[in-house]
Amino acid sequence: MAGEQREPGQLRLAPESFLAPDLVNDIHRNGVDDSRRKLLRGAFAAASAALVAPSLRAADDPDIVSVPEWSRSLGKPVAANPYGLPSPYESNIVRRQSPGLTQTDQASVAFTPLQNLFGMITPSGLHFERHHQGWVDIDPRRHRLMINGLVETPLVFTMEDLLRLPSVSRIHFLECGANTALEWGNVAVPTVQYSHGMLSASEFTGVPVSLLLERAGYDRKRARYLLAEGADGSSMTRTINLENALDDAMVAYGQNGEMLRPENGYPLRLVVPGVQGVSWVKWLRRLEVGDQPWAAKDEASHYVDLMPDGTHRQYTSIQEAKSVITAPSGGQKLLKQGYYCITGLAWSGRGSVSKVEVSIDGGRNWLVARLEGPVLPKALTRFNFDWTWGGEEALLQSRVTDTSGYTQPTRAQLVAVRGTRSIYHNNAIQTWCVGADGEVHNVQLG
Amino acid sequence: MAGEQREPGQLRLAPESFLAPDLVNDIHRNGVDDSRRKLLRGAFAAASAALVAPSLRAADDPDIVSVPEWSRSLGKPVAANPYGLPSPYESNIVRRQSPGLTQTDQASVAFTPLQNLFGMITPSGLHFERHHQGWVDIDPRRHRLMINGLVETPLVFTMEDLLRLPSVSRIHFLECGANTALEWGNVAVPTVQYSHGMLSASEFTGVPVSLLLERAGYDRKRARYLLAEGADGSSMTRTINLENALDDAMVAYGQNGEMLRPENGYPLRLVVPGVQGVSWVKWLRRLEVGDQPWAAKDEASHYVDLMPDGTHRQYTSIQEAKSVITAPSGGQKLLKQGYYCITGLAWSGRGSVSKVEVSIDGGRNWLVARLEGPVLPKALTRFNFDWTWGGEEALLQSRVTDTSGYTQPTRAQLVAVRGTRSIYHNNAIQTWCVGADGEVHNVQLG
């Protein structure tokens, strides 16, 4: 912990990350005496009571007096790491599995550490994982994509073929339909990594599905659906609405500037912007054109929503507008009163974020948050909100309104329509309770 | 090579990358007989003579007949890699040092493999490196940022302090002032990685410099410059115009969603959008406010431009508009005639890209390329251009016009003003010559 580091002779390279989930703890364990506070000034001075900004303090801080070793030595050469990696001080910022969530680790989830991330792009190494029969290292030279079904000419493409075709690049979010699943019941998981971490965003590059379908000569009168099929052991299959496929779907090989990562479908995955993640079939090997849904396993027995009257919603696809505060969030602790920058993410499968509001009193009052640009359709939008904590209990919430005019519902509003027996498609407003002791907990209101 | 992979029993996991610089070779070695060409259709059919899109060909392709092992087995569990890495088939996509470019590997360059990248974001692991005394692993708990000079109150911030302050996130390019340096003379380096690979782009997150200066109470009457100083062994110092600093500069800790990589300044670097890379001081430890430039080593003896009359340009900062075709590019080969998607990058330190034009005849005729969105200020913009190669010699060029109305100069236009004795700030139009044999070479026109 940072506070411990200040003791001379006790500096150690802790295996835990500098920016671990207890970031706020770390910040506040760097205590600062009151006399230093008067040095703060500027627009945020009034809100900065807890901020550490002392004047030069050579006398009492050995770290400043002694010139650190990295300022007195020859560093490492260029290309020491031909492919670079994060600092060893960040080794705790990783994807995490939720033990016991599923029966096998090959059909499980590893969550993105949203509480530690910035901006709108998810580093590919931290993109969440959700597999149905594990992930595989496919040899791209042996991989094929078939286009068949209601087409004039079935086609098979090699990866080389696809890389030669006209491509598009776009930034989009990818959210599993089961994200925030446990919140349907009375299980409030402790951290935002586990409650909302089946969410990532990347710049994807690939070939528009429309181009491939046109090349195969799809039957414009009969075609209404696509079946997408993966090459992993589960042969994951999903029905895609042709409307979505022709709009902005792509057969993607690129992610954040380089080839897809194996866990995310290398060498090829379907990208269906705005649609739930299960339809973004990884290790994509086939697109079949048809005139009716296929009722595949993962759209008949899974990814359906059980409604209060016993019926179920099937073939849902679009991820509705949703937002979440990523810091401060569950598991963190505010150790001092003062200024905090509340930060989080907002997104919508139906368009762009038009507004994010933040409440610190459980939804009684709302104020508009700042949005970091560019605000893109079907992408993550980072929001920030200035807050001064006075030591009182606070109920932190965010809610998004998208360009369709839809506003994210409260949990009570969602439950009134959907009941509590669903697993999927929970886009309710999330509440983090800051206790008078500064501890942040996941709570369910209403 | 991909063509070799078709022999049964000879499948091997080649150590070289699937998407190596000879991508175009690989594509074309997948020969296809004429009878299959008739299967092609759609908007690009006329331009697709070389494209491999056969119908089902089970009889002659063992890769398709036999179900690959990854479709018949249980894959790897989630979180097998808590921090994910590229596919082993991409192990050749790396930063590369140019041997002999500098006397020591700690004061050298490792170039970004632009020929292999997609979109507008550079993966952090492939961000180019340029160090002056090697790179270092700084312990963030011992790192400090001082604000001093013409300020009311000198301040020292810990990393925890900075992480508590209001932040912004923006996508910007970063180009070394010496990028494309060798092209000033008669040295046409063979590949775009070495000619233009001191160029990368990331989403940066950090605290606006303006906020820090206001907090320290900078002298609004006298302040005209900032000195930025790094904590590595070289104590890199650069003078920054206050105007740039107050406009959109930030003290950044985040890059592409996570903390900066050590080679890129972890835990803190200066981001000065549009300004040459040397001013984006890494391992930033100090910002001093002053009323005149400091004439530091790296702005007096380096990063100056020797003009034809023997004088030199000093304190240049803004990177002028520039573009380059990244594929096909030097070292690649077109083995067959037919459709190619010419792709590349364009950027400007003075604003946004408003237009990119491509010529295939050395600049006699120009056609407008497609821009991939979002087109952002002081960021990279990906362009694509459809081309059918008929086997003739071709001179591929791109030129950008930015929102200031400035158009990238030809080499002759640049040399007429600047001579050929510069090292820095070469933004001339790049020419790739496609020979009748399909080989692509770097050539200098005019």
Image (tube, coloured by chain):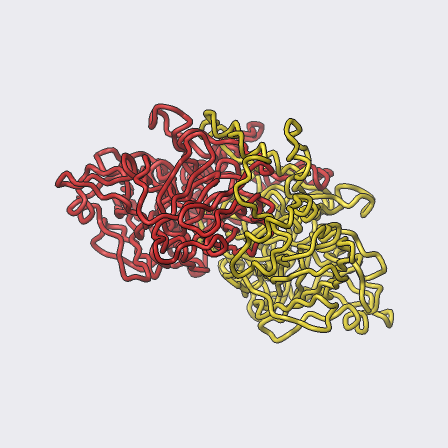
Chain colours: A red, B yellow
Residue farthest to the left, as pictured: A309
Q: Is residue B97 left or right of residue A408?
A: right
Choose between B54 and A32: the one closer to the eye: B54
Residue B2, compared with residue B285, is above or below; it is above
Q: Can residue B263 be seen in this view?
A: yes
Q: In this view, does A12 lie to the left or right of B31?
A: left
Q: Where is residue A128 in the image (x, y as percent from the top left)?
A: 43, 38
Choose between B172 and A431: the one closer to the eye: B172
Q: Can residue A40 be seen in this view?
A: no
Q: In which quarter of the image is the C terminus of chain A?
A: top left
Q: Residue at x 64, y 52 (%)?
A: B50
Residue B264, compared with residue B367, is above or below; it is above
Q: Position of residue B221 (x, y in %)?
A: 57, 71
Toward which corner of the image does residue A353 lie, by quadrant?
bottom left
Q: Which residue is drawn at 72% across and 38% down?
A: A73
Residue A110, compared with residue B233, is above or below; it is above
Q: Position of residue B310 (x, y in %)?
A: 87, 69
Q: In this view, does A358 lie to the left or right of B149?
A: left
Q: In this view, does A330 lie to the left or right of B397?
A: left
Choose between A401 and A146: the one closer to the eye: A146
Residue B76, compared with residue B393, is above or below; it is above
Q: Where is residue A219 in the image (x, y as percent from the top left)?
A: 40, 55
Toward which corner of the image does residue B278 lie, by quadrant?
bottom right
Residue farthest to the bottom, as pictured: B405
Q: Disc count in the image?
A: 0
